[in-house]
Image (cartoon, rainbow, N blue to C red):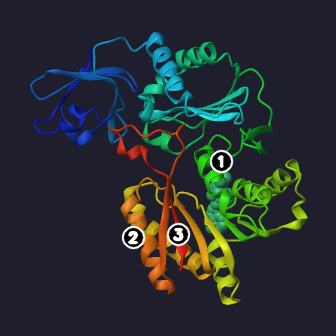
Amino acid sequence: MNAIVLKRGKDKAAKHRHPWIFSGAIHELIGCPANGETIEVLDSNKEFLGLAAYSPYSQIRARFWTFKKEHIDKDFFTNRINYAIQKRNEFRNSSTDTAWRLVHGESDLMPGLIVDQYDDVLALQFLSSGVELHREIIIKSLQEITGIINIFERSDVDVRKLEGLDERKGLISGIVPEEMTIVEGNLKFIVNIPIGHKTGFYLDQRDNRKLISKFYKGRDILNVFAYTGGFSVYAAFHQANAITSLDSSADALEIAKRNMNLNGFNPSSYEWMIEDAFKSLRKMRDINRKFDVVILDPPKFASTQSQVERASRGYKDINLLGFKLLNPGGILITFSCSGGISDSLFQKIVSDAALDSGVSASIMQKLTQGPDHPIGLNFPEGSYLKGLVCKRD
Ligand code: SAH
């Protein structure tokens, strides 16, 4: 079998079962494996460490499948997928929620594979050359395990370039409507799998949507980066006094309005702003507008380490403005989904923003991604969504 031998002293991460092997850790490549092919990983003494998918174009040159000798075949994926579904089952509220992530890549020991269930539809992403090579058997396993045949692929993501793969999007099997409705708790949401963000909806925010709904009653809410109105619809349901939803995408806000309607709320009772958040928050500050609750859930500002500095300035800017728009006693709920921004850096940015805005505030609660987006203990990179609930004095 083809193999890679790691450099002396560079096998620590692998021995701690981190799933990634960077090109700089490799001493020698034995053989000529194709993109995605399974290889053996050996330590500097040529002792077996595990089996990995080889990825010749990426800085992440290989991703571990397993740390024992076994076949990477259909049974392997069937076992892994079954386990992934089973391990999160007790965290799932299946009586009220019809959408749920079934497989979350590295943290479910299937590097690069994302499987989201939206009712009777699966939305898939193949983000590494390893899962790409095994695409057919993974799809078969998923169909057999879940009994779901309506499958759509959303591998139209930049990161595939790093793996030497083209983007791909389209129907895999069955029937997938352009638009469908999912249920989350007491509420319904329109999800557009073929063109929505990620695979259609921000499933990772589900528990946060529920958790922060206790702050809405009788309050004035500003939901910045509202997308299809997840937080706004919860705010309406929990009897907020007024809700302003802001997003630069007119299409997203159009669906947000329809989501209000779908849940029995009249969208014209609320304020909708199709604007750039950076400009709009400034304008609202200048006219001294105030809110009781401000939610900031921006897109990923930093995809890579090199973007961290610019991203930090972006986060600082919106958080500073967010604090300025808060009434005394108000609550800022602020998120970052940038993997490159650590928990502690995000906390520092928000703390600097509060200082510069001239308000004092405390972190009352920390938020993270839901349990269907688990974080492998050996894969800290899996922890990407950070949220702070800050109360202004
Ligand atoms: N809070 C949402 C998800 C937000 S996704 C939820 O829970 O479903 C990020 C959103 O930010 C997208 O809808 C995108 O259109 C919007 N966005 C990106 N850049 C923006 C900008 N500069 N100003 C306003 N909105 C922006």
Mark whose residue sits in front, 1 or 2: 2
Q: Is residue 101 above or below residue 357?
A: above
342 relative to 266 in the view: left or right: left
In the rendered structure, which amino acid carries the disc numbered 2? Lys
Q: Which residue is mark 1?
A: 197
Q: Residues within 10 Å of mark 2 (few under 14, many from 20)?
A: some
In the rendered structure, which amino acid carries the disc numbered 1? His
Q: Residues within 10 Å of mark 3 (few under 14, many from 20)?
A: many
**Among numbered discs 2 and 3, the one appearing first in the sequence:** 2
Residue 284 rendering spot, x and y as whole percentages: 69, 82
Q: Quadrant of ligand 1?
A: bottom right
Residue 185 rendering spot, x and y as whole percentages: 72, 42
Going 71% across and 28% down the picture, which residue do you hit? 121
Q: Is residue 375 above or below residue 348?
A: above
Q: Secondary structure at mark 2?
A: helix
Q: Is residue 64 above or below residue 359?
A: above
Determine the CA span between mark 1 and mark 2.
Answer: 28 Å
Q: Which residue is mark 3?
A: 390
Tell me if the residue at label 1 has its CB under 8 Å from ligand 1. Answer: yes
Q: Are marks 1 and 2 in contact (CB under 8 Å)?
A: no
> Considering depth in this image, is 140 or 381 the residue closer to the camera?
381
Mark whose residue sits in front, 2 or 3: 3
**Among numbered discs 1 and 2, the one appearing first in the sequence:** 1
Going 58% across and 70% down the picture, which residue do you hit? 332
The disc at residue 348 is 2
Residue 311 rendering spot, x and y as whole percentages: 46, 66
Q: Is residue 128 visible?
A: no
Quarter of the picture containing the N terminus is top left
